[in-house]
Amino acid sequence: MTREIKQPADLAVLEESLRKSGRLNGSPDLGAVLVLPRLLTAAELYKTETREQRALVPGLFYDGLTILAARPKDGKSWLALQLSIAIAGGRSLDGVDVCETGTVLFGALEDPEIRTANRLRKLAAPGPWLENITFFYQLLPLMGGGGEQLRELIKKVQPRVVVLDTLTALVKASKRESDVFRTQYEEVTCLRQICTDARVAALLVHHTRKGIAAGPIEAVAGTGGVTAAADAIWVLSRKPEGVATLDVTGREVEERSFALHFNRDEPFGWQVRGDGQDLAMSTERSSVIDLLREEGAMSPRQISAELGKSREGVRQMLRRMVSDGQLRREGRKYTL
């Protein structure tokens, strides 16, 4: 029997009908209708009305799925909570302009309720904003009923933003290593689709991998399936001196870096201090100054060996530091 090949106007209705009848079960039934994907010409796409992403924080946070990744204990949960408070209409996150406020649905899946309460009290004074953040602490694995639970929670709360802390608490470990990429991609794609359907912005908190990575995408823990399904990636990298960088990249977001500082006095929490590249440069220069203060005059070769930096990069930085009046050159060596 020859299969009938159709491209119906309403594929979703037909597919659902076939699925219920058992004719889309993966079997090679020659009598089944082969459903083709919808086809669009470039001319049709060109005429399509453009829908711009809605921004909550211009240049940083938009509709879609954003992953915030950092090492354990580096303050990613604090940052997610601070941003949630600002979006809910509470205390602002210093250095960040929230252009749209709204309700936040926050899944604190690795924290007890008392920890959330303590952090809220530490970060902001009470006010009307408290009614604009709703927390939940349990969810089934995304592909094991959690997706349906999340859809219902979004319908009930009607949030502008959904925060999920963390991805590890949302997923079910795969028994076979060969399935990990596919499984992680499916799980993150499921979450992205839920948020796209509801037209909400989602922030998914995750961990970074151990060791040094080439960039924000490579720094995120797990397989490429995690980052492939996300719209934007934030990687928070904390330095020993209490400062940090937030590296941002994504489909629609301009790639950039923010400099942050975690203040343990009042006001407690993260503050955005400017450009992260400037912070990286000032940190490298501080390392050189500390080294010369301890060791005295040194050559570029000695400095590069001590700091683990390329010799040519160190030479260029030393020349700039001399030009800026931070160092003096004495023969082949540099000193304060």
Image (tube, rainbow, N blue to C red):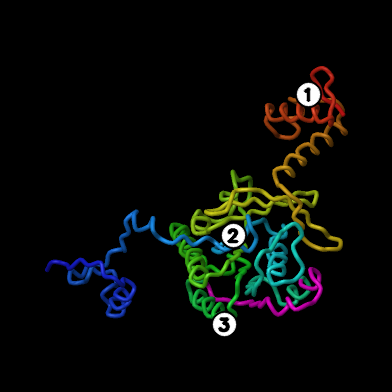
Q: CA distance from mark 3 to mark 1?
A: 65 Å
At mark 2, the secondary structure is strand
What residue sits right under mark 1 in the picture? 299
Q: Which mark is residue 67?
A: 2
- Label located before the other in sequence (3 or 1): 3
Q: Nearer the viewer, residue 38 or 310?
A: 38
Q: CA distance from mark 1 to mark 2?
A: 43 Å
Residue 33 horizontal side relative to residue 298, left or right: left
Decide: is 38 above or below 130.
above
Residue most extreme to the top: 331
**Where residue 39 sits: x, y (%)?**
30, 60
Residue 14 horizontal side relative to residue 228, left or right: left
Where is the N terminus found, in terms of image quarters? bottom left
Amino acid marked by disc 3: Lys
How crowded pointer 3 is (Cα within 10 Å; few <14, some 14-19, many 20+) is rated as few
Residue most extreme to the left: 1
Where is the C terminus found, in terms of image quarters? top right
Q: Where is residue 269, by image quadrant? A: bottom right
| Residue 187 part of the magenta segment | no
Label 2 near label 1: C-beta < 8 Å? Answer: no
What residue sits right under mark 3 in the picture? 156
Identify which residue is drawn at 49% across, 59% down: 229
At mark 1, the secondary structure is loop
**Where residue 73 sits: x, y (%)?**
72, 59
**Where residue 140 sits: x, y (%)?**
54, 76
- Label located before the other in sequence (3 or 2): 2
Which stretch did the figure color magenta? Answer: 120-141
Identify which residue is drawn at 34% across, 55% down: 43
Front: mark 3 or 1: 3
At mark 3, the secondary structure is helix
- Label located before the other in sequence (1 or 2): 2
| Residue 121 part of the magenta segment | yes
